[in-house]
Image: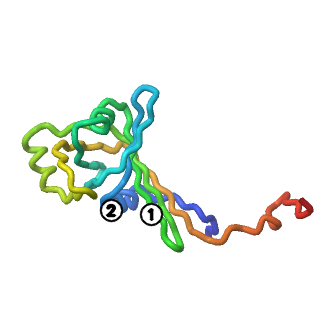
Protein backbone atom coordinates (compact mmCIF):
# COMPACT_ATOMS: atom_id res chain seq x y z
CA UNK A 1 0.00 0.00 0.00
CA UNK A 2 1.35 3.41 -0.97
CA UNK A 3 1.91 5.54 2.14
CA UNK A 4 2.91 8.63 0.18
CA UNK A 5 0.95 11.72 1.18
CA UNK A 6 0.85 12.90 -2.49
CA UNK A 7 -1.00 11.07 -5.28
CA UNK A 8 -1.54 11.95 -8.93
CA UNK A 9 -5.17 12.39 -9.98
CA UNK A 10 -6.20 10.73 -13.25
CA UNK A 11 -7.30 12.87 -16.18
CA UNK A 12 -10.84 11.49 -15.91
CA UNK A 13 -11.08 12.45 -12.23
CA UNK A 14 -9.55 15.88 -12.94
CA UNK A 15 -12.32 16.51 -15.49
CA UNK A 16 -14.97 15.38 -12.97
CA UNK A 17 -13.57 17.74 -10.33
CA UNK A 18 -13.53 20.63 -12.81
CA UNK A 19 -17.19 19.93 -13.65
CA UNK A 20 -18.21 19.72 -9.98
CA UNK A 21 -17.08 23.21 -9.03
CA UNK A 22 -17.62 26.74 -10.34
CA UNK A 23 -14.84 28.96 -9.01
CA UNK A 24 -11.21 28.90 -10.13
CA UNK A 25 -8.31 31.01 -11.31
CA UNK A 26 -6.86 31.75 -14.72
CA UNK A 27 -3.23 32.68 -15.20
CA UNK A 28 -1.44 33.87 -18.31
CA UNK A 29 1.58 35.83 -19.41
CA UNK A 30 1.50 38.76 -21.79
CA UNK A 31 5.01 39.99 -22.48
CA UNK A 32 6.83 40.23 -19.17
CA UNK A 33 3.65 40.46 -17.09
CA UNK A 34 2.11 37.42 -15.40
CA UNK A 35 -1.57 37.86 -14.51
CA UNK A 36 -3.85 35.78 -12.29
CA UNK A 37 -7.60 36.36 -12.04
CA UNK A 38 -10.41 34.59 -10.17
CA UNK A 39 -13.30 33.47 -12.38
CA UNK A 40 -16.64 31.77 -12.09
CA UNK A 41 -16.76 29.11 -14.75
CA UNK A 42 -18.52 26.14 -16.26
CA UNK A 43 -16.60 23.03 -17.29
CA UNK A 44 -17.73 20.56 -19.92
CA UNK A 45 -15.15 17.95 -20.83
CA UNK A 46 -11.97 19.72 -21.90
CA UNK A 47 -13.68 23.14 -22.22
CA UNK A 48 -13.82 25.84 -19.55
CA UNK A 49 -16.21 28.74 -20.21
CA UNK A 50 -16.30 31.95 -18.20
CA UNK A 51 -17.92 35.38 -18.44
CA UNK A 52 -16.07 38.65 -18.19
CA UNK A 53 -16.27 42.30 -19.11
CA UNK A 54 -14.01 44.20 -21.50
CA UNK A 55 -10.69 44.99 -19.83
CA UNK A 56 -7.34 43.55 -18.84
CA UNK A 57 -8.60 40.02 -18.21
CA UNK A 58 -10.36 39.70 -21.56
CA UNK A 59 -7.58 41.31 -23.61
CA UNK A 60 -4.79 39.44 -21.84
CA UNK A 61 -6.32 35.99 -21.91
CA UNK A 62 -6.94 36.33 -25.64
CA UNK A 63 -3.39 37.54 -26.35
CA UNK A 64 -1.71 34.82 -24.32
CA UNK A 65 -0.31 31.76 -26.07
CA UNK A 66 -1.05 29.51 -23.09
CA UNK A 67 -3.65 29.94 -20.37
CA UNK A 68 -3.47 28.05 -17.10
CA UNK A 69 -6.67 27.25 -15.24
CA UNK A 70 -6.56 26.07 -11.63
CA UNK A 71 -8.97 24.92 -8.94
CA UNK A 72 -8.23 23.47 -5.55
CA UNK A 73 -9.84 22.31 -2.34
CA UNK A 74 -8.49 22.07 1.19
CA UNK A 75 -10.33 19.78 3.58
CA UNK A 76 -9.59 18.41 7.02
CA UNK A 77 -8.11 15.10 5.81
CA UNK A 78 -7.11 15.85 2.26
CA UNK A 79 -6.49 18.61 -0.22
CA UNK A 80 -6.28 18.53 -4.00
CA UNK A 81 -5.37 20.73 -6.91
CA UNK A 82 -6.29 20.46 -10.59
CA UNK A 83 -4.47 22.42 -13.28
CA UNK A 84 -5.32 22.69 -16.97
CA UNK A 85 -3.39 24.29 -19.82
CA UNK A 86 -4.92 25.45 -23.06
CA UNK A 87 -5.73 28.18 -25.51
CA UNK A 88 -8.47 30.74 -24.94
CA UNK A 89 -10.84 32.10 -27.53
CA UNK A 90 -13.55 34.74 -27.46
CA UNK A 91 -17.00 33.35 -28.28
CA UNK A 92 -18.38 35.47 -31.09
CA UNK A 93 -20.96 33.55 -33.10
CA UNK A 94 -24.57 34.05 -32.06
CA UNK A 95 -25.02 30.30 -31.58
CA UNK A 96 -21.97 30.02 -29.27
CA UNK A 97 -23.02 33.06 -27.27
CA UNK A 98 -26.60 31.80 -26.91
CA UNK A 99 -25.31 28.42 -25.71
CA UNK A 100 -22.91 30.10 -23.25
CA UNK A 101 -25.70 32.30 -21.88
CA UNK A 102 -27.60 29.14 -20.89
CA UNK A 103 -24.68 27.81 -18.84
CA UNK A 104 -24.93 28.04 -15.04
CA UNK A 105 -22.16 30.62 -14.61
CA UNK A 106 -22.93 32.64 -11.50
CA UNK A 107 -20.78 35.70 -10.71
CA UNK A 108 -19.78 36.34 -7.10
CA UNK A 109 -20.76 39.98 -7.39
CA UNK A 110 -23.59 41.44 -9.47
CA UNK A 111 -21.71 43.03 -12.35
CA UNK A 112 -22.46 43.08 -16.05
CA UNK A 113 -20.29 40.54 -17.84
CA UNK A 114 -21.42 40.00 -21.41
CA UNK A 115 -18.23 38.59 -22.93
CA UNK A 116 -17.69 34.83 -22.99
CA UNK A 117 -14.33 33.10 -23.22
CA UNK A 118 -13.70 29.40 -23.72
CA UNK A 119 -10.45 27.73 -22.78
CA UNK A 120 -9.91 24.55 -24.76
CA UNK A 121 -7.77 22.46 -22.42
CA UNK A 122 -4.95 20.60 -24.14
CA UNK A 123 -3.90 18.87 -20.93
CA UNK A 124 -5.01 18.53 -17.32
CA UNK A 125 -3.26 17.17 -14.27
CA UNK A 126 -3.97 16.98 -10.59
CA UNK A 127 -2.60 15.98 -7.25
CA UNK A 128 -4.30 14.82 -4.08
CA UNK A 129 -2.62 15.48 -0.76
CA UNK A 130 -3.43 13.42 2.32
CA UNK A 131 -3.12 15.77 5.24
CA UNK A 132 -1.36 14.51 8.32
CA UNK A 133 0.67 15.84 11.20
CA UNK A 134 4.04 17.31 10.32
CA UNK A 135 6.83 14.85 11.13
CA UNK A 136 8.92 15.49 14.20
CA UNK A 137 12.10 17.16 12.98
CA UNK A 138 14.20 15.02 15.34
CA UNK A 139 13.13 11.87 13.44
CA UNK A 140 14.19 13.22 10.05
CA UNK A 141 17.22 11.50 8.54
CA UNK A 142 20.30 13.61 9.21
CA UNK A 143 18.54 15.68 11.89
CA UNK A 144 20.83 16.90 14.62
CA UNK A 145 18.99 17.26 17.89
CA UNK A 146 21.89 19.17 19.50
CA UNK A 147 21.20 22.45 17.63
Question: In the depicted view, which residue is nearer to us: 33 or 99?
Answer: 33
Image quarter of the N terminus: bottom right
Q: How many marks?
A: 2
Q: On residue 136, which mark appears?
A: none
Would you say the residues marked 1 and 2 are in contact, meaning their CB atoms lie under 8 Å apart? Answer: yes
Q: First in sequence: mark 1 or mark 2?
A: 2
**Furthest residue in direction top, as rendered:** 31
Dividing the picture into quadrants, the one containing residue 53 is top left
Identify the element where label 2 is drawn. Answer: loop
Q: Residues within 10 Å of mark 2 (few under 14, many from 20)?
A: some
- Tell me what residue is drawn at x 28 percent, y 33 percent: 59
- Tell me what residue is drawn at x 18 percent, y 42 percent: 115
Q: Which residue is mark 1?
A: 73
Give percent across and percent down for residue 87.
32, 37
Identify the element where label 1 is drawn. Answer: strand
Give percent across and percent down for residue 111.
21, 51
Question: Real-space Cα distance between discs 1 and 2?
Answer: 10 Å
Q: Residues within 10 Å of mark 1 (few under 14, many from 20)?
A: few
Please, is residue 7 above or below residue 93 in the view? below
Please, is residue 96 above or below residue 106 in the view? above
- Tell me what residue is drawn at x 25 percent, y 43 percent: 118
**Furthest residue in direction front, as rendered:** 110
Q: Which residue is mark 2?
A: 21
Q: Is residue 19 left or right of residue 31?
A: left
Give percent across and percent down for residue 82.
43, 55
Amino acid sequence: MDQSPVHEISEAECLKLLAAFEFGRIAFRVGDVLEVFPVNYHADGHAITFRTAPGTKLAGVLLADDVVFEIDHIGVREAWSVIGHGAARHLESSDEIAAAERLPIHPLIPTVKREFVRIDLARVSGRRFHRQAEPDVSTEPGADSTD
